[in-house]
Amino acid sequence: MKKYNYINWDERFVFGIPLIDRQHYKLVEITNRLHAACLNSTESANNLFVKTVHEAVDYVKHHFSTEEKLMILLDYSGYKAHKLEHQEFIKQVLSQSKRFTGKSQLTPRRFLHFLKEWILSHIGVCDRDLANYIITLKKEGRLGEMLAKKAV
Protein backbone atom coordinates (compact mmCIF):
# COMPACT_ATOMS: atom_id res chain seq x y z
CA MET A 1 0.00 0.00 0.00
CA LYS A 2 1.35 3.41 -0.99
CA LYS A 3 1.98 5.82 1.88
CA TYR A 4 -0.37 8.79 1.81
CA ASN A 5 0.64 12.03 3.48
CA TYR A 6 -1.98 14.39 4.80
CA ILE A 7 0.39 17.28 4.14
CA ASN A 8 2.88 16.88 1.32
CA TRP A 9 6.16 18.67 1.90
CA ASP A 10 6.92 20.95 -1.00
CA GLU A 11 8.88 24.03 -1.97
CA ARG A 12 6.34 26.48 -0.54
CA PHE A 13 7.53 25.45 2.93
CA VAL A 14 11.23 26.01 2.14
CA PHE A 15 12.54 29.42 3.09
CA GLY A 16 16.26 28.83 2.69
CA ILE A 17 16.83 29.09 6.42
CA PRO A 18 17.97 25.53 7.19
CA LEU A 19 17.10 25.47 10.90
CA ILE A 20 13.58 26.81 10.33
CA ASP A 21 13.09 24.58 7.27
CA ARG A 22 14.03 21.48 9.31
CA GLN A 23 11.64 22.48 12.08
CA HIS A 24 8.78 23.06 9.65
CA TYR A 25 9.47 19.65 8.10
CA LYS A 26 9.25 18.06 11.56
CA LEU A 27 5.86 19.73 12.18
CA VAL A 28 4.56 18.33 8.90
CA GLU A 29 5.97 14.91 9.83
CA ILE A 30 4.16 14.93 13.20
CA THR A 31 0.89 15.83 11.47
CA ASN A 32 1.35 13.02 8.94
CA ARG A 33 1.96 10.49 11.74
CA LEU A 34 -1.34 11.44 13.34
CA HIS A 35 -3.04 11.11 9.97
CA ALA A 36 -1.58 7.61 9.50
CA ALA A 37 -2.98 6.58 12.87
CA CYS A 38 -6.41 7.92 11.92
CA LEU A 39 -6.34 5.72 8.81
CA ASN A 40 -5.43 2.60 10.77
CA SER A 41 -8.29 2.51 13.25
CA THR A 42 -10.10 4.63 15.77
CA GLU A 43 -8.35 2.89 18.67
CA SER A 44 -4.97 3.46 17.07
CA ALA A 45 -5.81 7.09 16.41
CA ASN A 46 -7.04 7.65 19.94
CA ASN A 47 -3.94 6.06 21.48
CA LEU A 48 -1.59 8.01 19.26
CA PHE A 49 -3.57 11.22 19.52
CA VAL A 50 -2.64 12.10 23.10
CA LYS A 51 1.01 11.18 22.54
CA THR A 52 1.17 13.19 19.32
CA VAL A 53 -0.53 16.21 20.84
CA HIS A 54 2.05 16.29 23.61
CA GLU A 55 4.86 15.83 21.09
CA ALA A 56 3.40 18.56 18.88
CA VAL A 57 3.05 21.00 21.77
CA ASP A 58 6.60 20.34 22.97
CA TYR A 59 8.05 20.63 19.50
CA VAL A 60 6.00 23.68 18.59
CA LYS A 61 7.16 25.44 21.77
CA HIS A 62 10.77 24.68 20.77
CA HIS A 63 10.15 25.88 17.21
CA PHE A 64 8.36 29.03 18.35
CA SER A 65 11.19 29.82 20.74
CA THR A 66 13.68 29.51 17.87
CA GLU A 67 11.64 31.81 15.62
CA GLU A 68 11.07 34.36 18.37
CA LYS A 69 14.77 34.52 19.27
CA LEU A 70 15.59 35.02 15.61
CA MET A 71 12.99 37.79 15.27
CA ILE A 72 14.44 39.61 18.29
CA LEU A 73 17.99 39.24 16.97
CA LEU A 74 16.96 40.71 13.63
CA ASP A 75 14.73 43.49 14.99
CA TYR A 76 11.77 42.06 13.07
CA SER A 77 8.90 44.57 13.15
CA GLY A 78 6.26 41.81 13.05
CA TYR A 79 7.58 40.18 16.22
CA LYS A 80 4.70 41.06 18.56
CA ALA A 81 1.95 39.92 16.18
CA HIS A 82 3.86 36.75 15.30
CA LYS A 83 4.42 35.92 18.97
CA LEU A 84 0.71 36.47 19.69
CA GLU A 85 -0.16 34.00 16.95
CA HIS A 86 2.20 31.47 18.52
CA GLN A 87 0.59 31.95 21.93
CA GLU A 88 -2.91 31.58 20.49
CA PHE A 89 -1.97 28.34 18.75
CA ILE A 90 -0.59 26.82 21.97
CA LYS A 91 -3.74 27.89 23.81
CA GLN A 92 -5.98 26.31 21.15
CA VAL A 93 -4.01 23.06 21.08
CA LEU A 94 -4.12 22.70 24.85
CA SER A 95 -7.82 23.52 24.92
CA GLN A 96 -8.62 21.00 22.20
CA SER A 97 -6.53 18.25 23.80
CA LYS A 98 -8.39 18.75 27.11
CA ARG A 99 -11.71 18.44 25.27
CA PHE A 100 -10.54 15.19 23.71
CA THR A 101 -9.46 13.61 26.99
CA GLY A 102 -12.76 14.75 28.49
CA LYS A 103 -14.60 12.49 26.00
CA SER A 104 -16.22 15.37 24.15
CA GLN A 105 -16.96 15.55 20.46
CA LEU A 106 -13.38 16.36 19.51
CA THR A 107 -11.93 13.54 17.46
CA PRO A 108 -8.40 12.99 16.24
CA ARG A 109 -9.60 13.77 12.71
CA ARG A 110 -10.99 17.16 13.76
CA PHE A 111 -7.77 17.96 15.56
CA LEU A 112 -5.82 16.81 12.52
CA HIS A 113 -7.80 19.18 10.31
CA PHE A 114 -7.18 22.04 12.75
CA LEU A 115 -3.44 21.27 12.82
CA LYS A 116 -3.17 21.08 9.04
CA GLU A 117 -5.01 24.34 8.49
CA TRP A 118 -2.92 26.10 11.10
CA ILE A 119 0.38 24.79 9.73
CA LEU A 120 -0.50 25.76 6.18
CA SER A 121 -1.68 29.24 7.11
CA HIS A 122 1.06 29.98 9.64
CA ILE A 123 3.95 28.75 7.51
CA GLY A 124 2.38 30.16 4.36
CA VAL A 125 1.70 33.65 5.72
CA CYS A 126 3.38 34.63 9.01
CA ASP A 127 6.53 32.60 8.55
CA ARG A 128 6.73 33.58 4.89
CA ASP A 129 6.75 37.24 5.94
CA LEU A 130 9.60 36.53 8.35
CA ALA A 131 11.51 34.59 5.69
CA ASN A 132 11.08 37.42 3.19
CA TYR A 133 12.44 39.85 5.76
CA ILE A 134 15.49 37.64 6.32
CA ILE A 135 16.00 37.19 2.57
CA THR A 136 15.88 40.97 2.13
CA LEU A 137 18.48 41.41 4.88
CA LYS A 138 20.71 38.86 3.11
CA LYS A 139 20.32 40.59 -0.27
CA GLU A 140 21.12 43.97 1.27
CA GLY A 141 24.16 42.51 3.02
CA ARG A 142 22.82 43.48 6.44
CA LEU A 143 22.09 40.02 7.91
CA GLY A 144 25.62 39.25 9.09
CA GLU A 145 26.04 42.78 10.42
CA MET A 146 22.80 42.55 12.46
CA LEU A 147 23.67 39.15 13.87
CA ALA A 148 27.23 40.25 14.73
CA LYS A 149 25.96 43.43 16.42
CA LYS A 150 23.60 41.41 18.66
CA ALA A 151 26.27 38.84 19.51
CA VAL A 152 28.49 41.52 21.09
Image (spheres, rainbow, N blue to C red):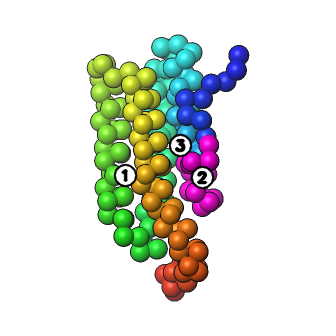
Residue 86 badge: 1
Q: Position of residue 38 (x, y in %)?
A: 51, 20
Whether residue 14 appears in magenta in the rendering, the answer is yes
Q: Position of residue 80 (x, y in %)?
A: 32, 63
* Mark 3 / mark 1, whichever is N-terminal: 3
* Mark 2 / mark 3, whichever is N-terminal: 2
Q: Position of residue 68 (x, y in %)?
A: 43, 63
Which of labels 2 and 3 is toward the front?
2
Span highlighted in magenta in the image: 10-24
* Secondary structure character of the magenta stretch overall: helix
Q: Position of residue 35 (x, y in %)?
A: 53, 26
Query: As shown in the figure, which amino acid type bears the numbered disc 1?
Result: His
Residue 27 badge: 3
Q: Residue at x 62, y 60 (%)?
A: 16
Judge whether residue 8 can be spotted in this image: yes
Identify the image quadrant of residue 89: top left
Residue 14 badge: 2
* Mark 2 / mark 1, whichever is N-terminal: 2
Q: Spatial distance from mark 3 to mark 1, Cα to Cα?
A: 14 Å
Residue 127 badge: none
Query: As shown in the figure, which amino acid type bears the numbered disc 2?
Result: Val
Query: As shown in the figure, which amino acid type bears the numbered disc 3?
Result: Leu
- What kind of element bears circle 3? helix
**Which residue reaches farthest right?**
1
User: Can you say whether 39 is above or below 119 in the image?
Assistant: above
- What kind of element bears circle 1? helix
Q: Are marks 3 and 1 in contact (CB under 8 Å)?
A: no
